[in-house]
Image: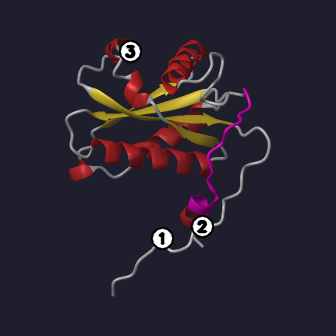
Amino acid sequence: MSDVLKAMEERRSIRKYKADMVPQEIIDKIIEAGLYAASGKGTQNTIIIQVTNKELRDKISEMNCKIGGWEEGFDPFYGAPAMLIVLAKKDWPTGIYDGSLVMGNLMLAAHDLGIGSCWIHRAKEEFETEWGKELLKSLGIKEEYVGIGHCALGYVEGDEPKAAPRKENRVYYVK
């Protein structure tokens, strides 16, 4: 079996991370994999925001918690010290699909490099707020973007989960 297919079978969402920061060199490799995701008409209309600043990470976690309706103090990022936020141009028809492919590449690359990951939702809602729009402006991002997802990154605390058996009758053949 190829390494890519093996990674696809083995990668699982991680929901408990060590506090140890992932080295920048590894994060850069993960980001590069995201940048190579397929995109509609090859337009590359997605962007990635790396967040390793603890204060900003915690603020995003707090916002995400409120949007998700959890009790104050819950961390929807499960203690992951780093996140990569994927956004797509708001007016691009395949933006959500393109951004989803970026997220998939990020998570597979993280797994391949020994880093746990989890797709955390509610980026769309976060970047619809004035706070989210101001964050983009502060980074020099002028165009309108829609949040696709957060890729939580970190070293796995404990054992990695195993894949559940695949459900039957999910493929139909027309030959």
Q: Depth check: give the residue in front, 21 or 81.
A: 81
Q: Left of 76 or right of it: where is 147?
A: left
Q: Quadrant of residue 93?
A: top left
Image disc number at residue 135: 3
Q: Confirm or deny contact between disc 2 and disc 1 (CB under 8 A).
A: yes
Question: Where residue 154 appears, x then y in whole percent?
Answer: 65, 35
**Mark 2 residue crowding within 10 angstroms, few (<14) / some (14–19) / many (20+):** few
Residue at image position (71%, 36%) is: 16
Q: Depth check: give the residue in front, 131 or 101.
A: 131
Q: Which residue is mark 1?
A: 170
Number of the front mark, 2 or 3 = 2
Q: Quadrant of residue 34?
A: top left
**Mark 1 residue crowding within 10 angstroms, few (<14) / some (14–19) / many (20+):** few
Tell me if residue 10 is in the magenta stretch.
yes
Q: Confirm or deny contact between disc 3 and disc 1 (CB under 8 A).
A: no
Colour approach in the figure: secondary structure
Residue 159 vertical placement versus 47 (above, below): below
- How many angstroms separate mark 3 from mark 1 (CA)? 42 Å
Q: Residue furthest right?
A: 158
Residue at image position (44%, 35%) is: 149
